[in-house]
Image (cartoon, rainbow, N blue to C red):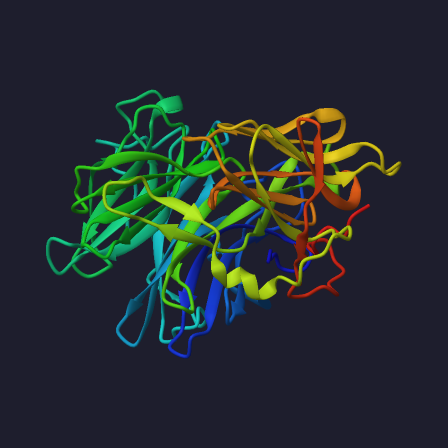
């Protein structure tokens, strides 16, 4: 359901599917810490495998920083492997050091493998294959040229790379953009002006380009300020791009799209944790969350829905207190659903509320942990809790997520006006319930 390598946190990642159907995730990994160190936190890529995108088995590191003096000597960040001949080509972010004011100097490198399982990488040369062009992109303080994502160009036989960059024509606080470059051979790239530059985003990280069934394109980008992600659509890679708004709520980040075992498109993303596993701990890099179905219909905005592939991990309905569970609530008026109680059993420690278009999650003493305004009044809610992690789907659409380390399991109860009713839940079977390390799922108080 959620994955991080033993003792470490997960950050950005890439997904692969081998010919035998085995999935592999390559991911940035680093220690638990509230303060991020650009040069020491993420120096290798971890790898894990799965047959179903839910249960992941750690397989150890597969790639690390380059030799001293090279463009990737200090850190290696977000990667994207693509099929190349009988093997793969992987584009990745290299960090050579810091600018005078302490900002990481970023560029994009290339590695090849004769395998398709995410292992066996060897670098192409000793330098980057593409760097930010100062004609269009910031290259000094607050520069960005990272998170490469490469697809076949739809206007020829070459390739197109999207990257997280900063538009030099805008203030740094609003210059977050998707930069791009083109290539005929994967090794020689021509940088182009920004592909998408909204003008109101500080960072547009981890861009994803997905070709849809009708030949049009979907762009997903993570927004630094909101810690969620948004979507754009276009008839061609070069645009024009239409902004479609939020796709993943605050607390979901760095998404990737892949075909599920049944062939449908799903999105996986990261979710944070809190240092010390307490409500007062600072947020830090976290874990890989379970898949959501990606739904795109015509001119409607894309959305993420509950993925039916998770149903196999759910048990029979029960009224008993359960720490990891999924429950469904029909809404006939303003409702508040208690999910966990304080140790005295009489007060709510975790609850979800909805009064139609307003949806929120509260923690101890009614503190708002998250809230959103829905596009239309909801008629049903689906709530998922795995350890401290909470997700809410409104009319089957992923709408809200948060973290809560307070309280103990309780029978779920919904209050609407003077009416109180018990909500049956389906317990969640964890893929690896015996794990006992810093990255294990929070076991409760």
Q: Is residue 133 visible?
A: yes
Q: Position of residue 232 (x, y in %)?
A: 29, 39
- The extreme left residue here reads 156
Please state if 386 lies on the left or on the right of 321 as rendered: left
Q: Nearer the viewer, residue 421 or 441?
A: 421
Q: Position of residue 433 (x, y in %)?
A: 72, 64
Q: Report the number of discs.
A: 0
- The extreme front residue here reads 419
- The extreme top residue here reads 171
Q: Nearer the viewer, residue 101 or 352?
A: 352
- The extreme bottom residue here reads 20
Picture residue at 65% right of the left edge, 59% below the top: 428
Query: Dividing the picture into quarters, in which one does residue 259 lie?
Result: bottom left
Q: Is residue 302 above or below residue 282?
A: below
Where is the C terminus found, in terms of image quarters?
top right
Q: Nearer the viewer, residue 16 or 61?
A: 16
Picture residue at 42% right of the left edge, 31% below the top: 376
Where is the N terminus found, in terms of image quarters?
bottom right
Q: Is residue 69 visible?
A: no
Picture residue at 40% right of the left edge, 32% below the top: 203
Q: Is residue 354 above or below residue 253?
A: above
Picture residue at 26% right of the left edge, 23% below the top: 169
Q: Is residue 331 above or below residue 54?
A: above
Q: Position of residue 202 (x, y in %)?
A: 40, 28
Q: Position of residue 319 (x, y in %)?
A: 74, 52
Please state if 8 lies on the left or on the right of 212 as rendered: right
């Amino acid at each position: 359901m959620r994955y991080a390598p033993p003792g470490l946190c997960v950050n950005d990642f890439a997904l692969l599917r081998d010919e035998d159907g085995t999935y592999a995730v390559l991911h940035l990994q680093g220690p638990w810490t509230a303060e991020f160190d650009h040069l020491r936190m993420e120096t290798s890529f971890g790898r894990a495998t799965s047959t179903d995108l839910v249960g992941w088995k750690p397989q150890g590191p597969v790639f690390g920083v380059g030799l001293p003096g090279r463009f990737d000597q200090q850190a290696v960040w977000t990667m994207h492997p693509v099929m190349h001949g009988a093997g793969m080509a992987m584009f990745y972010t290299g960090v050579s050091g810091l600018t005078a004011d302490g900002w990481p100097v970023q560029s994009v490198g290339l590695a090849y493998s004769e395998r398709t399982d995410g292992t066996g990488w060897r670098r192409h040369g000793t330098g980057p294959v593409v760097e930010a062009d100062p004609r269009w992109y910031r290259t000094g303080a607050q520069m960005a040229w990272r998170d490469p994502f490469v697809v076949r160009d739809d206007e020829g036989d070459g390739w197109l790379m999207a990257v997280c960059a900063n538009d030099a024509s805008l203030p740094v606080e609003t210059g977050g953009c998707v930069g791009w470059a083109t290539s005929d051979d994967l090794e020689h790239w021509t940088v182009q002006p920004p592909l998408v530059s909204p003008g109101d985003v500080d960072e547009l990280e981890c861009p994803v380009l997905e070709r849809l069934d009708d030949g049009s394109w979907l762009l997903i980008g993570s927004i630094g300020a909101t810690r969620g992600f948004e979507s754009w659509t276009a008839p061609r890679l070069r645009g024009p791009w239409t902004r479609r708004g939020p796709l993943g709520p605050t607390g979901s980040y760095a998404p990737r799209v892949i075909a599920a075992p049944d062939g449908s498109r799903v999105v996986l993303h990261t979710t944070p944790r809190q240092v010390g596993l307490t409500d007062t701990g600072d947020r830090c890099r976290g874990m890989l969350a379970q898949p959501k179905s990606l739904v795109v219909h015509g001119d409607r905005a894309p959305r993420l829905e509950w993925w039916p592939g998770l149903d196999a991990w759910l048990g029979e309905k029960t009224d008993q207190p359960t720490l990891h569970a999924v429950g469904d609530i029909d809404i006939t008026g303003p409702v508040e659903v208690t999910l966990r109680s304080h140790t005295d059993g009489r007060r709510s420690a975790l609850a979800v509320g909805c009064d139609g278009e307003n949806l929120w999650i509260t923690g101890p003493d009614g503190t708002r942990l998250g809230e959103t305004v829905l596009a239309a009044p909801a008629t049903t809610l689906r709530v998922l809790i795995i350890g401290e992690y909470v997700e809410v789907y409104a009319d089957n659409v992923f709408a809200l997520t948060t973290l809560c380390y307070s309280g103990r399991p309780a029978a779920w109860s919904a209050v609407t006006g003077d009416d109180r009713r018990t909500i049956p839940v389906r317990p969640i079977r964890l893929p690896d319930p015996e794990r006992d390390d810093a990255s294990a799922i929070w076991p409760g108080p």
